[in-house]
Amino acid sequence: MKTDTILMMVAALVCAGAVSFLATPLVRVMAYKVGAVDVPKDSRRIHTHPVPRLGGFAIFLGFIVAALLFARIDRQIQGVLIGSVIIVIMGVIDDITPLPALLKFVIQIIAALVAVLHGVEIESIINPIVWSSKEFLHFGGWSIPISVIWIVAVTNSVNLIDGLDGLAVGVSTIAAVTMLLIAFIGMQWNIVILLAALVGGCVGFAPYNKNPAKIFMGDTGALFL
């Protein structure tokens, strides 16, 4: 089983990386055509010329193609993929024409709810109170709101660090590789393949996003990751 998983993992990583790498120049051209361009108009921006900001769509393409080809799409994975599609559609629209913050927040909650209602829940955590006799804290009925809050919080955390060339994609790659190793040790093979697809999508995009960036991932990529 491990050998088959390693082969599938490598195949998913290579597939996602290749799709992302080849799609990024096409997405870059598309971004210029639809007006998804970041124009430097204040001191906060360090780039001196307009840069397209739809690169996250290439990351998503690499990920989704590899996931559909190599992962077993169970109910939980289905929820993650549907939620991702909702976020990416919102991100693409926002990168072309900025959306109100409240509307984006509501859509993020909806996307998180889709995943949670498909079974992606934080049901318990290791008890941080070391002197307690209980090893775990179980959330019970609170697991749904806590899971939604967690997903939305992490979504916006990645978005907030997307301020320097290569930072968000680099941090996300490191996080995905770390979780991949944990999933591998825990023999969660389907999650291993899904994370390999995510790593591949990031790695394929990264060469275009290093300083000076030829393309930004935009909200499409930051919110998706």
Image (spheres, rainbow, N blue to C red):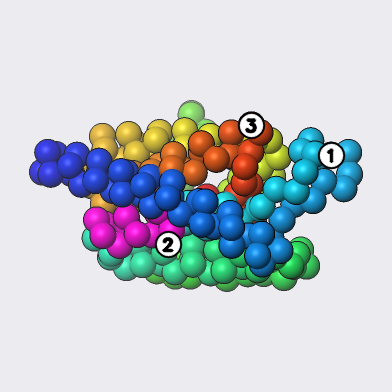
Give the percent coordinates (x, y) of residue 89: 57, 69
Give the residue at mark 3. 211
Mark 3: secondary structure: loop
Cα distance in 3D space between marks 3 and 1: 16 Å
From the viewer's perspective, is 187 left or right of 77? left
Q: List x then y, in percent, for residue 222.
A: 60, 50
The residue tagged 2 is 80
Q: Residue type at mark 3: give it.
A: Asn
Q: Secondary structure at mark 1?
A: loop
> Disc 1 versus disc 2: distance between alpha carbons?
34 Å
Q: Tell me: residue 10, above or below residue 107.
A: above
In this view, 115 is above or below 12: below
In screen coordinates, is 217 left or right of 59?
A: right
Q: Looking at the picture, tell me which residue is in the foreground, 206 or 133.
A: 206
Q: Is residue 221 above or below residue 142?
A: above
The amino acid sitting under disc 1 is Arg
- The tag earlier along the polypeptide, 3 or 1, is 1
Residue 157 lies in the magenta stretch? no
Disc number lying in front (3 or 2): 3
Type of the residue with mark 2 = Val
